[in-house]
Image (cartoon, helix red, strand yellow):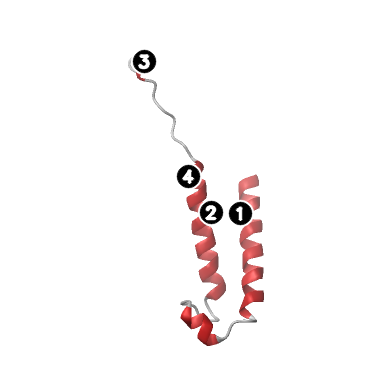
Amino acid sequence: MLKQLFRAMVIGRQASACRQTMEYLTNSQLNDIGFSRDNFVEGIQARVSAELDAAEAANTFAATENENLLGAV
């Protein structure tokens, strides 16, 4: 639950920062980085979401098997 809240806060703040940044970027600059005014916020949001997913996947560990206990059950 807290991870979902944190994720929502990060994505919300990121969207706000993108909107503020877009005020200072020209259409030419946006095109240079591969975005337009229509898809800039959504594109950056997708990148941040992917980064958060990757970080969460890196922190998720599978349980290791103890070779001494295999077949004991």
| Residue type indicated by callout 2 | Leu
Residue 52 position, x and y percent, is 53, 54
Q: Distance between the Cα atoms at labels 4 and 1? A: 16 Å
Q: Position of residue 46 (x, y in %)?
A: 51, 64
For numbered disc 2, what is the local secondary structure? helix
Q: Position of residue 39 (x, y in %)?
A: 52, 76
Is residue 11 positioned above or below 31 on the image? Answer: above
Q: Is residue 35 above or below residue 13?
A: below
Q: Earlier in the sequence, mark 2 or mark 4?
A: 2
SS under mark 1 = helix
Looking at the image, do the residues carrying marks 1 and 3 touch, with CB atoms under 8 Å apart? Answer: no
Residue located beneath label 4 in the image: 58
Tell me the residue that label 1 is attached to: 7
Q: How many marks?
A: 4
Task: Please state which amino acid type lies under the numbered disc 4.
Answer: Ala
Q: Earlier in the sequence, mark 1 or mark 2?
A: 1
The answer to the question of whether label 1 and label 2 lie on touching residues, with beta carbons closer than 8 A, is yes
Horizontal arrangement in the rendering, residue 47 relative to residue 24 (left or right):
left
Using the numbered discs, state the Cα–Cα distance from disc 1 to disc 2 in whole angstroms. 8 Å
> Position of 12 compared to 51: left or right?
right
Label 1 CA crowd tier, 10 Å (few <14, some 14–19, many 20+): some
Judged by depth in the image, the label closer to the viewer, 4 or 1, is 4
- Residue of label 3: 68
Task: Find residue 23 and name its label.
Answer: none
Q: Is residue 37 left or right of residue 6?
A: left
